[in-house]
Amino acid sequence: LKSLIGSNTDLVIDSLGRTVGDYLRMRGSAIRPKDAMKFLSLDTTLDQKGVSGSNVRVPDTGWNRTSKNKVSDQCDIDVIVGGMSRETFYNDYFMPGRPFVLRGMTPKSELGAFSKHRWSTTDRFHPNTKVSVGPTAYPSITGQKHCKRDMTIAQLENATECLEMPGVPMVHARHPKEEDLKELYPMYNGNLYDRNGGWREVEHFFGPKPWEYHLGWQVFFGGDGSGATLHWHNAAFNILYSGIKQWKMTPPRYRGWTGMPAKAATEKVEEELDESISVVCTQRPGDIAYIPDYWGHLTLNAGFAIGAAVILPDDYQMTADANHQMTADANPRILFVHINKNGGTSVIRMLQSKCKSQYTSERWGNGHRTFHATAHSLIDHYGREAWDDSYSFALVRHPLARQVSNFFYLVDKCSRDYSECEGRMFPKGPLRTDEDKIEAFHEHTWKLYNAYPPGSEKSYLFGGWGHGNEEFKTMNATQTSWMVDEQGEMAVQNVFKLENLSRDMNELGEAMPCLKHATADQATGRELKMTEDFGDEDDGGDGHLEMVHANASPKYPDYRLFGKNKR
């Protein structure tokens, strides 16, 4: 690097306008402060200083939490709470080769599947199941041997010693088979790429169809003091499900390999390794750690730890470049605020078909997804910068028409299975005449208003389900609440009226060029009209790709008749 730039650390070296100095100052930079000063005379010590915290208690997952070691919450790399956009990953971590930790992205149901109580109901991972163990994850690779006797998982949990290796904590690791995955991830039927799971981030960051590449999956668990000895390999993601894991990482220039057990290797590294060339971080249950190509790393477990990892081959990592180029070519990204019962399902189907490189569907956090996400939720997920760089829009509708549509959709659903509608105050009997339907709507609206008045904690239920957005205080029953940011300020760039789009789809085509060939159908004499959302409010709906004349809803009178109410 010095031979290329001399001592000019202000030299701009990428399309984002970042300089050499910017790269050196990034937390977790592969060029550590020692080398930045030695070769480029730039002091980055303060920039690379980690975040120190108090000692961390091992969370209770039912497994043995006892640890002989104090665990600090220090982390010298970025810890991102919530999601990260694909662009941020590519520009700030993948290309510079920086590790990071994502916090809060593993669903609670997935974490619960690795609890002791849950494993006690399985066959392959029952605490009484015997497994091969050793001083390192794969003893034969590191010049070690397995313990002569298999141990039960319960013995591993309690840090039982191997007779021929006293004082050495044991660990078990395996490349999971299909039967293993079905027991470990029953909520996804063993599908690691399920859109609701923690591993969805792999496809999100790198690209579609990861199952077509030879990704290296691993599952591992071990008692207090066990872990992974110092080693390196291709980039990897790691999710911790139980215990606490302390990481020590070195950039590619200082990567290393040893056959010593994790505890001995950790002690040796702490004694002899120059701290200025390494980074440390503490991983908690649910955290997703990303380790870039060829970074050396070792881990030490506190309490009984369970985790899983995937190593990414070169050919799959190359899809990140193609993915990024597609996004760049399709600038800007499209973020659609899909307000329920406003015809949005039809728009989503068009975006998925015609604007594949600009519009993506995702799930994140506790019940959030791009389908029915508010602007506040999308900003919280992608970040304000990504939101501002995107094209955002929403569809609104006459408030009474929206309420009437929602009522009859749910009445129809409840007539088929009323058990799903308990507590939602919908009529049970058939509504045969228009008068019956209008009166039932008025009665239901009055009950909702009294149960969830404006300003109440669950006022959003007056307009429909919260779809995860209810965790934000900005959420209420109004359509406006879907379109504002954390400060309550209007955040979407464009707001279209459903009633107008029914007559002229050209507005969407002008705003989003990728839709122009869809709206061109109008010019050839094929009239396009919006249909309402009458798909399931929880599963994404059965809206149409084609805009059709037919209204897929249950029959009900013109919504304007419902406004004639004395109340």
Image (spheres, rainbow, N blue to C red):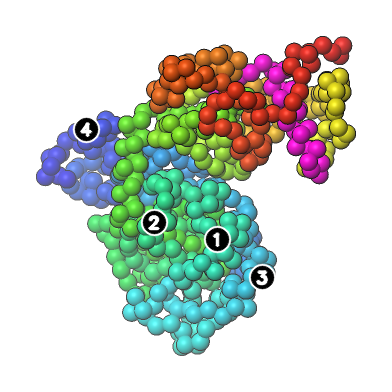
Q: Can you tell which quarter of the image residue 407 is in?
A: top right
In the figure, 291 relative to 364: above or below?
below
Q: Which residue does the numbered mark 2 point to in the structure image? A: 212
- Could one spot residue 77 in this view of the protein? no
Q: Which residue does the numbered mark 4 point to in the structure image? A: 12
- Residue 385 rendering spot, x and y as whole percentages: 43, 29
Q: Amino acid at mark 4?
A: Val
- Residue 365 rendering spot, x and y as whole percentages: 57, 43
Query: Which disc, if any, is residue 190?
Result: 1
Tell me which residue sits at (39%, 69%) in the image. 229
Which mark lies nearer to you, 1 or 4?
1
Please provide the residue range marked out in magenta.
Answer: 394-419
Q: Nearer the viewer, residue 423 or 17?
A: 423
The Cα atoms of the two marked residues, 3 and 2, are separated by 33 Å
The Cα atoms of the two marked residues, 1 and 4, are separated by 46 Å
Which mark lies nearer to you, 3 or 2?
2
Q: Earlier in the sequence, mark 1 or mark 2?
A: 1
User: For the residue labelled by badge 1, is the local secondary structure a helix, a strand or a loop?
Assistant: loop
